Image: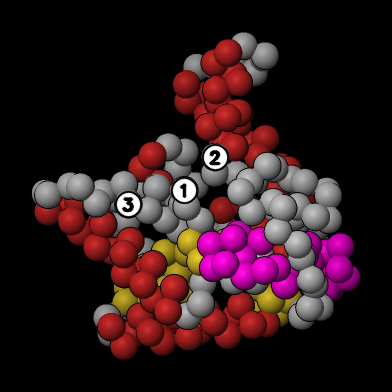
Amino acid sequence: MRPWSSIPIHECREPLEPLPDSLFRLEPHPYVAVGAPYGANGDPFRLRSTVVQRLLKAEKGLIASEPALRLSIFDAWRPIAVQAFMVEHTIAELCRERGVLPSHSQDYQQVVADVGRFWAAPSQDPATPPPHSTGAAVDLTLCDQQGMPLDMGGDIDAIGAISEPDHFAARADDEGRLWHGRRQLLAAVMQQAGFQQHPNEWWHYSFGDQLWAWRSGAASAIYAEAARSALTS
């Protein structure tokens, strides 16, 4: 359970829509590339229509502040089947990285716990949808005018403290200040457009889901799981 799991959802039945071509995106899509089961109609580069408009507002704010920079989308809508696949994939990858056997050992349970800080459980409960399944959440980074991503001090989806938004806040060296400044810039333009940031992930922002409601103080979320609400095609 997350701190936001108990927040009620009042679905507004706003459809998903494709991200406009004007927004850069990281392709090939990283989860499609490892075999995630999107299916024939599972375009990941879709969000609720209001979220798309707020994303465009965020990029407009970014350009006003830093004309040479743009937003680059890593991931957007994510069906629950993809969430389940990627949780298992990430656990398996981290086990290989740490030399841990996939058993019920203490080391394995630590891997599962570490992954769980960054990957929401693929809940089928309509009261606790994973954020990306709602079409409200987006993973993104900064890039240059040609779409080349900037170094943000850690990769998207990295498991560990390096992914926390303020990980470099206390660093006084040039690299640390650069990475912290870039993360702060991304946070500023997204928050000015109405988004709320995941507390553990510098790249994850949402509008309208339970996490957003929890961080913004809203009484309820407005987006449930999109597929369950028959808002996908």
Kindly identify which residue carries mark 3: 166
Tell me if residue 46 can be seen.
Answer: no
Residue 173, x across and y down, in percent: 11, 49
Q: Secondary structure at mark 1?
A: loop
Q: Going 39% across and 67% down the picture, which residue do you hit?
A: 187
Q: Amino acid at mark 3?
A: Asp
Q: Taking 165 as reference, is 198 left or right?
A: right
User: What residue span does the magenta drawing correspond to?
Assistant: 210-233
Q: Which percent across, then down, holds residue 33? A: 61, 51
Question: Mark 1 = which residue?
Answer: 200
Mark 1 nearby-residue class (10 Å; few <14, some 14–19, many ≥20): some
The circle on residue 117 is 2
200, above or below 115, in the image: below
Amino acid type shown at disc 2: Arg
CB contact under 8 Å: marks 3 and 2: no
Is 109 located above or below residue 47 in the figure? Answer: above
**Number of other residues with Cα within 10 Å of mark 2, as a class: few under 14, some 14 to 19, many 20 or more:** some
Quadrant in which the N terminus is drawn: top right
Verify CB contact (< 8 Å) between mark 2 and mark 1. yes
At x 40%, y 46%, the residue is 163
Q: Residues within 10 Å of mark 3 (few under 14, many from 20)?
A: some
> Which residue is pictured at 47% across the width and 80% down the height?
193
Classified by dominant secondary structure, the portion drawn in magenta counts as: loop
